[in-house]
Image (spheres, coloured by chain):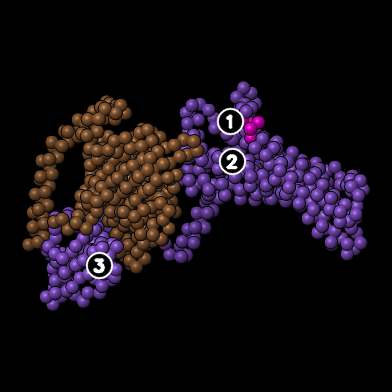
């Protein structure tokens, strides 16, 4: 290993003599000491420099440029390096300009409002495009892609049975258990059945399923379509004459709309099983009694409500997923961002719509 | 004269690979592969698609743990090394990946600063920014590219930015994975020139994977041919042409190979004169500086 980079001042500070290896690895605190020099030198001596790399050359070049210094004792390679570095000396910004705090905040607020507006507009436009595509396929049924649709039914529906079943089962138990604790204070444990039955059919079955489908399938839609866009697969489809809306989006939309009601009904049933088992083991209520009471206290409108809400939610989830996927541009980072956006948007929209539905059904007397 | 090269690895073996075997499942990519790269040379690595050029590079730089075999870089064994010791070796090399592999959340200039900040935290920000600045300019990127994010650049520009980052630490050894693929011919020629001039001034050793025959003729000192899971031949292009391996013959004597050869010959005639002129100019410049 060569000696570390060093320098001495000679002739009353007029000459700067570098020595050792003027390289990045051996630099140490040399740049700081150079900055602290009391007076600029007139002459730089490189005779004793053992090695130099571009960083060393840059330090010398900086002195030459700023203070108009002569360089002596540079070998051929060193002068070539100096020349190379000098040729590359162009002012360059490291990062984009940042503006002051208040302006920056206003700028960001404005931008995010614009972005939200654009997203809403895009979503509505996409909604229209999906409807147009659907109408087109209805008129020309031969363009309907059965294979893709069945495959999506499988991915969105059948493959989700396990996880949604487990989740619903546990939720059924939790509701029954928490309900029983509270109702016991009034000696009304028997009403646990009302709680489990009505809550799972009306709200939790469909809402929890929607959240699960958004996390499982909505994100997958965005990521799949997004990475296909990055790999230019979507463009390739268009040039071959295959409409991405028909081949990619429509099967996923259909899977969302058809599978959500089935899954949420299934989720409600499994939650009832969980609640029933808890009632049987912890409250001593036999299954027959549980089912009979369910029949008495849960109106059929509860199940209908869920079946009306579920396809709408499924549509929203698939719409947000496919829309965000189609928006992917540029880098792989965009796929991640769009996937997150798809999940957040779909869950948000589902909950907003659920609130509307709750008020609506109360108004028409489905209490 | 010669100060730079004495201290460098010139003449010594910088990379030594022996008995390297890589297997993915049933399929063997390398079997008992041997290769050595001398200091100060540009070694071109060629081979058909799927002959494991990139896997060889990844094995050398430690991204792929081979099934068996030994890899030495700068005389230090690389396999099974603990992270701290490997770090010291890593500081002395730079790697340019095929797609540039820039960090997407950082600007181009910030990308170049990453290795500098990692290894030399004592450098002040002004010097860091200046170093990033001239590195970016050296690779032929326009000044506007500095504050841009990788997603805003074209493929060729991303490659240049990747090279700037690979050169950030002034490495002694440079790994380039298809640096000129996807560049326009003018850009590719400029890239070749840049690598050649860096090699000459910094005494760089370059491990270069390429399909570009022009690059092979223009800058490579030796060429290693990968086929049948090993290095079937290594030498200058003239030496390779004398062999009668079918793939090598087809590669260099195919229509593209011959075009590149002709171009290289024409170039050589022209550049001899040019180089002499440049040397003269440099000598006089050096003389001015001394005086």
**Residue A167 lies in the magenta stretch:** no
Give the number of the disc on residue A221. Answer: 2
Q: Mark 1 lies on which chain?
A: A
SS under mark 3: loop
Residue A288 locus on image (x, y percent): 91, 46
Give the color of chain A as drawn: purple
Judge the density around disc 3: few (<14), some (14-19), many (≥20) Cα neighbours within 10 Å: some
The x and y percentages for residue A254 are 66, 34
> Relative to B246, is A306 on the left or the right?
right
Mark 1 element type = helix
B276 or A293: nearer the viewer: B276
**Measured from the top left, where is residue B82 in percent x and y?**
43, 58
Q: What stretch is highlighted in magenta?
A: A148-152
Residue labelled with disc 1: A246
Label 3 chain ID: A
Residue under pointer 3: A4
Q: Nearer the viewer, mark 3 or mark 2?
A: 3
**Chain that is brown in the image:** B
In the image, taking residue B1 as reference, residue A353 lies left or right, namely right
Which quarter of the rendering shows the N terminus of chain A?
bottom left
C-alpha gap between disc 3 and disc 1 = 68 Å
Question: At x 17% / y 74%, what residue is drawn?
Answer: A9
Q: Is the magenta stretch mostly helix, strand or loop?
A: helix
Q: Which of marks 3 and 2 is nearer the N terminus?
A: 3
Within 10 Å of disc 2 (Cα), the crowding (few <14, some 14-19, many 20+) is many
Mark 3 or mark 1, whichever is nearer to me = 3
């Amino acid at each position: 290993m060569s000696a570390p980079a060093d320098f001495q001042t000679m002739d009353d500070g007029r000459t700067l003599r570098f020595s050792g290896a003027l390289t990045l690895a051996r630099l140490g605190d040399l740049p700081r000491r150079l900055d602290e020099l009391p007076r600029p030198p007139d002459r730089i001596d490189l005779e004793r420099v053992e090695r130099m790399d571009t960083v060393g050359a840059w330090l010398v070049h900086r002195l030459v440029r700023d203070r108009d210094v002569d360089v002596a004792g540079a070998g051929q390679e060193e002068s070539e390096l100096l020349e190379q570095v000098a040729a590359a000396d162009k002012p360059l910004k490291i990062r984009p300009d940042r503006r002051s705090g208040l302006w920056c905040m206003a700028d960001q607020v404005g931008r995010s409002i614009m972005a939200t507006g654009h997203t809403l507009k895009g979503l509505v436009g996409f909604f229209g495009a999906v409807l147009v595509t659907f109408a087109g396929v209805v008129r020309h049924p031969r363009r309907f892609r059965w294979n893709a649709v069945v495959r999506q039914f499988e991915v969105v529906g059948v493959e989700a049975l396990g996880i949604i079943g487990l989740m619903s089962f546990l939720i059924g138990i939790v509701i029954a258990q928490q309900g029983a604790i509270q109702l016991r204070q009034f000696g009304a444990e028997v009403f646990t059945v009302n709680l489990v039955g009505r809550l799972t059919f009306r709200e939790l079955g469909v809402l929890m399923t929607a959240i699960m489908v958004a996390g499982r399938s909505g994100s997958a839609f965005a990521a799949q379509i997004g990475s296909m866009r990055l790999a230019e697969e979507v463009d390739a489809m268009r040039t071959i004459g295959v409409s991405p809306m028909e081949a990619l989006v429509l099967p996923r939309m259909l899977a969302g709309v058809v599978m959500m009601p089935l899954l949420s009904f299934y989720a409600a049933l499994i939650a009832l099983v969980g609640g029933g088992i808890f009632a049987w083991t912890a409250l001593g209520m036999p299954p027959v009694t549980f089912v009979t009471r369910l029949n008495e206290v849960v109106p059929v409108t509860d199940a209908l409500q869920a079946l009306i809400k579920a396809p709408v939610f499924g549509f929203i989830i698939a719409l947000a997923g496919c829309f965000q996927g189609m928006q992917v541009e540029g880098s792989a980072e965009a796929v991640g961002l769009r996937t997150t956006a798809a999940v957040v948007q779909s869950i948000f929209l589902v909950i907003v719509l659920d609130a509307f539905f709750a008020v609506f059904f109360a108004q028409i007397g489905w209490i | 004269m010669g100060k730079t090269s004495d201290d460098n690895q010139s003449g010594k073996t910088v990379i030594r690979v022996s008995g390297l075997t890589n297997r993915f499942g049933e399929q063997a990519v390398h079997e008992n592969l041997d290769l050595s790269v001398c200091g100060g040379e540009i070694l071109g690595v060629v081979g058909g698609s799927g002959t494991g050029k990139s896997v060889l590079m990844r094995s050398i730089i430690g991204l792929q743990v081979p099934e068996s075999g030994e890899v030495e870089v700068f005389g230090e064994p690389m396999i099974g090394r603990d992270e701290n010791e490997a770090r010291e070796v890593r500081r002395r090399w730079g790697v340019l990946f095929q797609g540039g592999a820039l960090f997407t959340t950082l600007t181009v200039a910030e990308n170049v600063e990453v290795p500098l900040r990692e290894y030399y935290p004592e450098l002040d920000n002004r010097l860091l920014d200046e170093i990033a600045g001239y590195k970016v300019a050296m690779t032929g990127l326009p000044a506007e590219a500095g504050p841009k994010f990788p997603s805003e650049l074209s493929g060729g520009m991303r490659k240049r930015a990747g090279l700037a980052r690979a050169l950030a630490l002034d490495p002694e050894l440079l790994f380039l994975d298809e640096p000129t693929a996807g560049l326009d011919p003018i850009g590719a020629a400029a890239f070749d020139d840049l690598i050649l001039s860096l090699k000459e001034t910094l005494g760089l050793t370059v491990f270069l994977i390429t399909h570009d025959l022009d690059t092979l003729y223009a800058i490579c000192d030796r060429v290693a041919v990968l086929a049948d899971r090993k290095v079937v031949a290594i030498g200058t292009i003239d030496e390779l042409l004398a062999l009668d391996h079918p793939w090598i013959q087809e590669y260099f004597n195919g229509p593209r190979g011959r075009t590149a050869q002709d171009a290289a010959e024409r170039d050589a005639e022209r550049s001899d004169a040019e180089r002499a002129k440049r040397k003269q100019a440099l000598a006089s410049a050096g003389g001015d500086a001394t005086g």
